[in-house]
Image: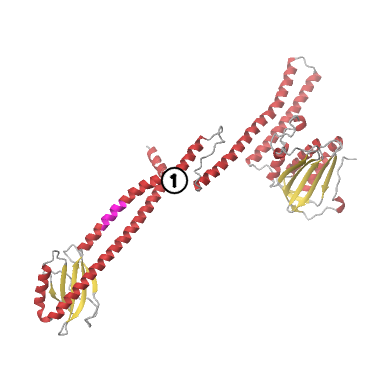
Amino acid sequence: MSSKPTRSRRLLSTIGARLTLWWTAITLGTCALLCTLLYIGLAVSLSREVDGFLVGETQEFRTILEEEGSVAFDEIERDIRRELGSRLRKDLTFRLLDAHGRLVVTSDPYDALPTKVDSTTATSAANEPTFRTVEVAGREWPYRVCSQWVMLADHTVYQAQAAYRLDRRATSLAGFRRLCFAAMGLAAVLSVVCGLVLARRSLQPVRAMIEKARSIGGVNLSDRLPRSETGDELDDLAAVLNEMLSRLERQFEEIQRFTADAAHELRTPLTAMRGNMEVALQRDTGTEELRHVLEESIDQFDQLTRTANDLLLLARADAGHGFLHNEPMSLSDAVRDVVDLYAALALDRGVELTLVAGENIECVADGTRIRQVLSNLLDNALNYAATGGAVVVTVERRADAALVEVADNGPGIDAKHLPHLFDRFYRVDAARSRRTGGSGLGLAICRSIVEAHLGTITATSVVGRGTTISFTLPCHASGHERPADASQHKENSPR
C-alpha cells in the first residue's frame, strides 16, 4: 500500500519532473501575466469608448436644451423618448436635473437612477463632464453616467446627464475572461507535453551516462561515460566523471598489484618455514639440526613481522588515519643520531660516511618516523655504495623548509627506474633476493611518511656516478646557530 505514494514521490523528485513543472509554471505565469495585461487594456479601452460615446451624447443633449429653452421641457422629453424608442437596445438614457437634484426630464419612463447632482461647479456652462458608475436596484447591470452643467437662456442652471447601461462591456469582458481561461488550460496541457518532451531530450545524455555507469565494474574499469561533444555542462560532467574513473582505475590497479605483491611477499617466508619444518619432521633430526631449523624459522618470522608492520603503516597512510605523533624536535640532532647509529656499519663495509650540517634546524614532526626515513635511506645507500666508496648526508635550510640529502657514489640507477623508485614492492635489480634487496617497501614508506608531514621526496641518479635521494620538511628557524667549526662535521666509524 505504501509503494504507490513512494513511487509518486520518486516521480516528482526526478529532475525531468521538476523541469516539466518549472516549464509549466513559467509558461502559465507568462500566459497569466499576458492575459491580465490584455484584460486590463481591454477594460480601459472599453471604458474610454463608453466615456467618449457618453460625452458626445451629452453634448448633443445640451445643444437641444440650449436651443429649445426651459419652456419646452415636456416637448423635449417627448422628442428624446420618441428618438430613443427606435433603438433596439434600451441602453441609453437622457436626464435633466435642476440644481437641487430634482428630475426634470428623463427619456426612461421607469427611470430608477439616483437623482443626486454632481458636486462640481455649476457657475460656468463650459465646465468639463464628469463620470461615475452607479448600481441600480433591481437591475442586473450597472450604468455609466456622464454629467455636465448647462445654463439656459434664462440663466437657470441644470445638469444634463447621459447614462449608458454597461451590459455589453461586461459581456465583452466576460467573453474575454472565458477565452483567457481556455487559453490557460490549453497552455497548461501544451506546456506539460512540451516540458516532458524537452526534459526527456535534455536528459537523454544523463540517462546514457547512468546506463553506462551501471555497467562499469571491476572487470571493465577502462570503459568511459559517453559524451555528446556539445560542450555543455553535461559534457563537462561526463569529462569530470571520466577523470574520476581514470583515477579509480589506476588506484584499483595499484591495489591489485599491491595485493598480489603482498601475498607473494608473505607466501615466500611461509613456504620456506613450512618446507624446513616438513624436512625436519620427515627424518630423524638431531638437536643441532633442529635448532638450526628453528633459528631459520625465527628469521622468517621476523621478516614476516617487518613486512606486516610495513603493510600496516602503508594501509593507515592510504586510509588517511593519523599515524604521526608530531612534536617540536631538532632535525639536525635526529640526522646526527641516525648517522652515528650507522657509522659502525659503514666502517665494517669500508664506506666513508659523512654528515654535513649547518645551523640547528627545528621542526614540528614525528621524530621516530623521521628517523625511520633516514634509516631506510642510509641503509639503501650503504648497500649500494661500493667498497671504499662514500655516502654523504647533508642537512640545510631552504627558505621555510629543511632539506635532507643522502648521496652515494654507487653504480647509480637507470633513468627508466626513477619514476617507479618509490612504488611499493618495486626493485631496481630484479635479481636481488628479499635478503639482499629487502621487501621493496622501504622507499614507499619513506614517501608516505614525508608526504604525511606535508613534505616532498625525490631521487636523482647518474649511472656510474651514484644516487641522491632528498626530502624536504616544513620547518622554522630555532634561533640557535651552530659554531663555525661544526659547519662541516665528518662522521666516520669510532676510532
Q: Tell me: 345 left or right of 311.
A: right
Question: Looking at the picture, does residue 116 appear above or below residue 31?
Answer: below
Q: Say whether residue 177 is magenta.
A: yes
| Coordinates of residue 268 in the picture (x, y in percent) | 71, 26
How crowded pointer 1 is (Cα within 10 Å; few <14, some 14-19, many 20+) is rated as some
Residue at 44%, 45% (x, y): give it: 202
- Quarter holding the N terminus is top left
Question: Looking at the picture, does residue 140 appear above or below residue 120?
Answer: above
Residue of label 1: 202
Quick check: can you spot residue 282? yes
| Coordinates of residue 91 in the picture (x, y in percent) | 16, 66
Identify the magenta region: 176-185
Question: Looking at the picture, does residue 141 appear above or below residue 56?
Answer: above
Q: Say whether residue 24 is magenta.
A: no
Q: Tell me: 343 left or right of 164.
A: right
Q: Amino acid at mark 1?
A: Ser
